[in-house]
Image (tube, rainbow, N blue to C red):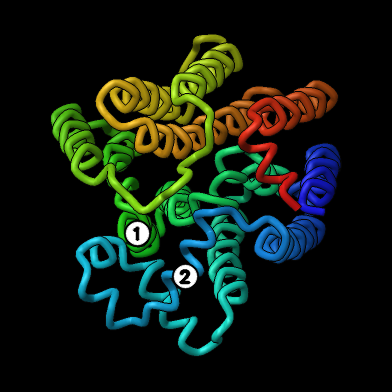
Amino acid sequence: MVMGFYIFLIIATLLLSIFSKSENKKSFRQCYILLFILLVCWSILCRTYAIQQDILVYMEVMKYGVDSFFSSFYFLREPVYWVSSGVLYGFIKNEILVLVFCDIIAFTVLVLSCYHAKLKPYFVLLFFLFFPSVMGILNVYRQFLATIFLFCFFLLYKKNFRFSFNFMFILACFTHNMAGVFLPLLFLIKKRINIFLLIISSVVAIIVAVIFQDGKSTRGSGDVPSFLFLVVIFVVFFIFVLLNRSSFKEESLRFFYINLYVGMLAICSVFFLSDVAAKRILMVGMIFLLFSIYSSIEERIKKGKNRFLIRIFFVLISIAPTFLFSSVLEMLLIS
């Protein structure tokens, strides 16, 4: 059932990539309402029919009680999910409903951020269909939530919502400390890049990653070797360069620096971190590369027919790893 709905979402994404137009405010709003409903359905199906080992751990831990969370440094350093899930379980007394409620909160934050940033609706669905998000919602859940908050931080920063983007970055870091390695994004998305602060923050980010690379994940991010994730990152980076024809100005130049940082971070992660920790960082980095490809398509490809064809190709290429990586496919087929 989960796989069937995943394929349905792929079809919906392809249709939205062809027919959605942000120029028509009414249809644009309706598309966002539709995709939010689809995402809620996706959450309910995942929580009901595709429960993985790590999710079972989350369901067990939320029963510990709020007091126990304050007696462990592990929970205190990442309190956003742990404490909130414990509080919610105290009221709801149903593990699945707690997870669905957390999903809906995260989906609402992302959908509203994307709506205000005027992103095409097809990209919002593609965000969730991309294999790091599939693995996230089905297994590495706190990382998934942190990725959403981190991406919203990026979008809101671009729209200059100062309080909101600061709050999102803090939420991301205290949902999963791994988000801290993306601190240099603060200096990469500004109009003027401070090289000194960028270097210092990058060194700090790597140190933080090494210190906080342990966790409670039992299966981690599946059996896919981290070097394959690294290959995906560099393939996406190569596509980004091709789309921009090696000519980077203003927005594309910022994305180039971001992608370059993600690539450097990916290499450092593979060589200096455990396989599980490296894959988690690589999975988050891939989301930003995915967005850079989307932005390049929407900015660079002006002809309608060409844009639609490239959008379709972009969607198909983005969802391909889900079917190529057996561990991801197994998660969807478990029901």
Q: Please, what secondary structure does the residue beneath circle 1 have?
A: helix
The answer to whether residue 86 is above or below residue 323 is below
- Evaluate whether residue 210 shows in this view: yes
Q: Quadrant of residue 10?
A: top right
- The residue sitting at 73% across, 32% down in the picture is 315
The local crowd at label 2, few if under 14, some if 14 to 19, many if 20 or more residues have their Cα within 10 Å, is few
Asked whether residue 29 is in view, the answer is: no
314 relative to 119, above or below: above
Location of residue 170 (image quadrant): bottom left
- Residue at horizontal 33 percent and vertical 50 percent from the top: 215
- Identify the disc placed on residue 162: 1
Label 2, secondary structure: give it: helix
Residue hosting label 2: 60
Between 110 and 158, the residue placed more toward the observer is 110
| Residue at the farthest bottom position | 91
Q: Amino acid at mark 1?
A: Arg
Circle nearer the N terminus (2, 1): 2
For the residue marked with disc 2, what is the amino acid? Glu
Residue 329, percent from left and from top: 69, 37
Q: Position of residue 118 (x, y in %)?
A: 62, 50
Q: Nearer the viewer, mark 2 or mark 1?
A: 2
